[in-house]
Amino acid sequence: MSEKSKGYIPVMLTPFTESGAVDFGGLTKLTELYLQAGAAGLFANCQSSEMFNLSPEEQLAVTEHVLHVAGGAVPVVATGTFGGAMEKQADFVKRMYETGVEAVIVITNMLAGESESADVFDERFGHLLDATADIPLGFYECPEPFKRVLTAEQLKRFVSTGRVIYHKDTCLDIEQIRAKLDATKQVSEFGLYDAYMVHAVESLKAGSAGLSCIQGNYYPELIVWLCNHYDSDELADQVARVQQFFIDHMEIMHAVYPIVAKYFLQKRGLPISTFTRKNAGIFDETVRTRMDSFYRHFQQLVEQIDLKSVWV
């Protein structure tokens, strides 16, 4: 994921059957659609995948299935730390890496508690580095159960080890993004992928390697389009319209997520259930009506910018 061109890395959903089992057929179709949309890589076993509601064996099986479907077309990363002693976390990092992923992602809130200091985090990450040989790693500032955001100084130290090649940033602050990019700019193998679409264009222009956001679980091709055209003078008006679309519809995509994303994909023709294992909220008629309206707004935007959609 060190390509200089900007790329979209989906935080993948996990389709389930109505009985609650992993729907591997649906996962195949979903993975293919991310690829068809132009994704530069895939982030399996993440928060959008409901990773905290999957067993370790399911986490491995889902990741292996994504790798099989992708067939080497793009790199795949997956989360490998879920709390407990560093030895336990290191063992699962090794198991996840054996699936064939390019890097194993470290959830920043799983190495130190909310009340513990950055020094504690740094020490434990050092232990994890020592215990996982030369396995490439990445960071994910996962919002659940709490958000631990790394500083630019921390990220610089970790990236300088040569082991950290990926960072999914959720700080929501463009100045922090710029500081992190400046601190890591000398390492070509490293890429920072921003999750916050409110400043997506600014982040890409500042040097982010790309975007990794939940919005791509509604319309991945639109995120790819922005990564390809964010700095186009010819399409500046359309880029501004797309950026404003993200801002205007930020709230609706987070409420009752990921049920709403699965419903949106259903409307786009993907044959998956809206079943989720996590307590995402109530998908009632009010939410359905809002999503139907949101879908119409998306269709209008697609026409306005003449975007070729990957779904009917």
Image (cartoon, rainbow, N blue to C red):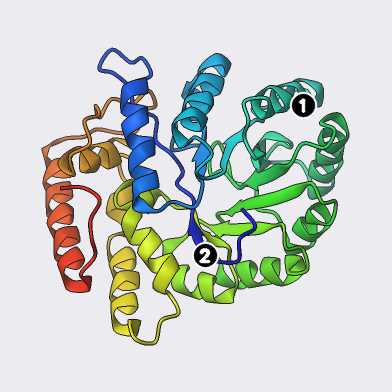
Q: How many marks?
A: 2
Q: Position of residue 303 (x, y in %)?
A: 15, 67
Q: Relative to 122, does residue 240 appear above or below in the rendering?
A: below
The residue furthest bottom is 233
Q: Position of residue 88 (x, y in %)?
A: 75, 20
Residue type at tag 2: Lys
On the picture, is 255 further left or further right than 212?
left
Q: Residue 6: give its label.
A: 2
- Between residue 297 and residue 226, name the one nearer to us: 226
Q: What secondary structure is marked by label 2? A: loop
Query: Badge 1 is on which residue?
Result: 90
Residue type at tag 1: Ala
Q: Position of residue 15 (x, y in %)?
A: 34, 27
Q: Relative to 293, does residue 180 appear above or below in the rendering?
A: below
Q: Position of residue 122 (x, y in %)?
A: 83, 45
User: Closer to the camera: disc 1 or disc 2?
Assistant: 2
Q: Relative to 10, does residue 263 appear above or below in the rendering?
A: above
